[in-house]
Image: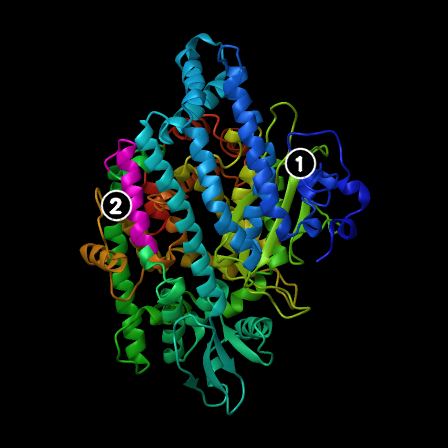
Amino acid sequence: MMTASEAMPAEALSPEAPSPETLALLADNPFAVIWKTPFGLPPFAAIRPDHIFPAFEAALGKNRSEIAAIVADPAAPSFANTIEALERAGKALSRVGGVFYNLSGADTNDALQAIDRDLSPLTSRHWSAIMMDPDLFARVDAVHAQRDALGLDAEQMRLLERTYRGFIRSGAKLGPEEKKRLAAINERLSGLGIQFGQNVLKDESSYALIVEDKAEGDAGLAGDAGLAGDVGLAGDAGLAGLPAFLIAAMARAATDRGHPGKHAVTLSRSIIEPFLTFSTRRDLREEAFIAWSKRGENGGETDNRAIVAEMVKLRAEKARLLGFATFAHFKLDDSMAKTPENVRDLLELVWKPAKARAAQEAANLAALAQAEGENSAIRPWDWRHYAEKVRQQTFALDEAVLKPYLQLDRIIQAAFDVAGKLFGLTFEAKPELEGYHPDVRIWEVKEKGGRHIGLFLGDYFARASKRSGAWMSAYRSQRNFEGEVRPIIVNVCNFAKPAEGKPALLSIDDARTLFHEFGHALHGLLSDVRYGSLAGTSVSRDFVELPSQLYEHWFLTREVMQEYCLHAETGEAIPEALIDKIKRAQTFNQGFATVEYTSSALVDLAFHSLENPGEIDPLAFEAAELARLGMPAEITMRHRTPHFTHVFSGDGYSAGYYSYLWSEVMDADAFNAFLEAGDVFAPEIAAKLKRFIYSAGDTRDAAEAYTLFRGRLPTPDALLEKRGLAVV
């Protein structure tokens, strides 16, 4: 790897006067200086793993000094010297963390993973010490007590309330022994969450079902994902039924894993799901599905079952310490939903019709399978295969025919141009800027008139160094406090990488995922608030999915598809008839999709509604909850417990996986505002959407923000209609 001096021009890393972001480090450490890179983009080529830990140690020390100065201030506590002072603190720590945590998710290696494990107890202790510091909280409490007499504007009042509430929820009012115990729980949970995620990544990256395309070939498993044995193939039977786009993606995946000339089924959704859809080899579908389903429960060092059991127990204890009946009560108290009962009501509202619809769908699949001579019961590895056949028969919609119209570059441009029509944004490619991996692409985002809005990074292809799924994150968040700071936002996806010189082709689900994550990106890019802790996606978990899920709707509009869905070989626009088939098929298989998702959300809620879990067997608990729900045998949870990273790889969606459905109530209703106006780009509605949703961050209560946009709160009706579950 290049040294700092080799990677960057001298002026890019030149020292300056001390800054809140710089650290006292060796001169070759990029975190020691102000980055004079274009737009302040991290100098990725100059940052080595051995720079990270010293930078974190220095940043933690600097933050402790900043907090100590606030506590030692002899002046009476005020909004400026306490609340705004806390906003000023931690800039160096944010800069280091912004780089490291993004890299550890999107392009990790053994060195970064070791750093993550070593950092976990240090950062947990750091934040516990700050949030439980009695002298610091006394200042925050004093300001909060006089809040009505301070003449604060709405955003200042919101910051004060959120800061005060954050301290309370972090244990600031507990006694000394309770604080000590809570700090220990937080530290242990942090380490367990990191280990959970690393275990899942190892199971995913080490597994491949290798298919040799030759007469004497066989299919076997590469890696140590916990399954053993090879499956003999005759000729190229391992590729039977697979469309050309999938064969090409599997060839690229095999080459990347050191098996040139062969084909690999990996656990990336962009390969495993189409393989399960198209492969006519039921034995191979079963083998691949079981590997996918059993991530995190294969025994050995990557098994997550004991981790889950301990996390559930510790989370319940944490909630009790903080005065809540269960961890679900604790988490949901700071959400739109407010209570577990409200969440369960929504989930069960869709569960019953979804299960009934899934039963109808299963009967249709079984009838088709029997007609083809397959008399065995439909199993989870069969569902996608026969569902695709039913879809083709019912709607004459063939994914292999559709996929050439969904070129990655065209769908990216579609997402950009929708943002232009709605919000007046433009995106200028910056190929001269260097990302953290050769696949990363960078654009400058501007408003009309040329005002710089931020940088957008796109990292679209699956690789072994990247965790699965898709997400948005920020290398730098927006703020206007003491100078304007514009954001640097990244979208990370896991699409199958095409052969050299060939366009990357997406499925409909892939394209919607791209629009979804770009909706999150716009939430970060369009943020226009004063204080960084209220910026962008720093909203309640069950509101944060509204901007992303709402943005998905524009991809499926006729206006977007006709302009951007051009055939990869002929250049012809997608036919009107094919668009009509796509629209008619939108509620197809929604029983399956809703059961798959909702069962995961209900199991998450059940785990975190336990008052005193004791010693539990996570898989037995999962099975018992699914049995109580009457889970169809033909379907599995979208995320089974041992690889449920949303919930157990950190605290983000714990007791909160329901959030996608909660936000879907809003996104279905919100898009109807444009339909009611007769224009999917209606300027007046788009302006309100930008002002009250995409740009507003957490400057007001989520229900208030939605009401200001729509004039009222939504009901579930639009959601049920969207999923085809409404009772007619």
Q: Mark 2 = which residue?
A: 349
- Whether residue 400 sits left or right of residue 384 in the image: it is right
Give the class, few, some or many, for how many residues have Cα within 10 Å of label 1's Cα (few <14, many ≥20).
some
**Relative image position of residue 63 (x, y in whole percent):** 55, 31
Amino acid bearing label 2: Leu
Q: Who is closer to the viewer here, 664 or 57?
A: 57
Q: Who is closer to the viewer here, 209 or 205?
A: 205
Which residues make up the magenta segment? 307-325
Amino acid bearing label 1: Ala
Q: Mark 1 = which residue?
A: 24
Viewport quadrant of the N terminus: bottom right
Of discs 2 and 1, which sits in the foreground?
1
Q: Residue at x 63, y 63 (%)?
A: 572
- Whether residue 362 sits left or right of residue 511 in the image: it is left
Q: Residue at x 65, y 36 (%)?
A: 23
- Corner quadrant of residue 477: top right
Q: CA distance from mark 2 to mark 1?
A: 56 Å
**Relative image position of residue 13 (x, y in whole percent):** 75, 41
- Whether residue 497 sits left or right of residue 9 in the image: it is left
**Relative image position of residue 308 (x, y in whole percent):** 32, 53
- Whether residue 7 sits left or right of residue 671 in the image: it is right
Q: Residue at x 47, y 60 (%)?
A: 201
Image label count: 2
Q: How would you classify the magenta stretch by its main secondary structure?
A: helix
Q: Which comes sooner in the sequence, label 2 or label 1?
A: 1
**Relative image position of residue 302 (x, y in whole percent):** 40, 63
